[in-house]
Image: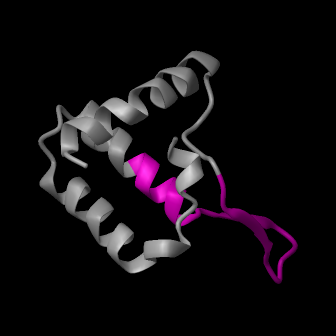
Amino acid sequence: MEKNEIISAIEPLIKAFDELGISYYIGGSIASSAYGKASYLCSPEDIILNKLVWYKTGGETSERQWNDVIGIIKVQGESLDKDLFK
């Protein structure tokens, strides 16, 4: 898949999140600390989505964001929940 195809594919998701006024968070988990406070742990899918949003809103010029996305996909591979991106 090419960069422009990926960006086009997530645009409806970005628009829906913006219209609803919610953050770009689709998964992850909550972990409790020794001090009784909840900590939110982002899933790899959340990180990919946020980096793609950053890439898109930054004019699609940040190679760092794009390369981070590619790196996460390479490392996580088949463990990623691809249905979240459909």
Q: Position of residue 38 (x, y in %)?
A: 79, 65
Query: Residue placed at 43% from the left, 74% from the top?
Result: 77
Where 16 falls versus 37 (above or below)?
A: above
Q: Position of residue 11 (x, y in %)?
A: 39, 27
Query: Residue placed at 50% from the left, 45% from the top?
Result: 85
Q: Is residue 59 magenta?
A: no
Q: Is residue 74 left or right of residue 23?
A: left
Q: Name the image quarter holding residue 42.
A: bottom right
Q: Name the image quarter holding residue 39.
A: bottom right
Magenta residues, start to end: 27-50
Q: Nearer the viewer, residue 34 or 16?
A: 16
Query: Residue placed at 45% from the left, 75% from the top?
Result: 76
Q: Position of residue 79 (x, y in %)?
A: 54, 74
Q: In the displayed orientation, state which residue is furthest to the right.
A: 36
Q: Nearer the viewer, residue 29 or 86?
A: 86
Where 1 falls versus 41 (above or below)?
A: above
Q: Is residue 59 left or right of residue 71?
A: left
Q: In the displayed orientation, state which residue is furthest to the bottom.
A: 34
Query: Residue placed at 21% from the left, 62% from the top?
Result: 67
Where 7 falls versus 41 (above or below)?
A: above
Q: Is residue 44 left or right of residue 66?
A: right
Q: Nearer the viewer, residue 84 or 33?
A: 84
Q: Position of residue 43 (x, y in %)?
A: 58, 64
Q: Is residue 27 left or right of residue 8?
A: right
> Colour mode?
one colour
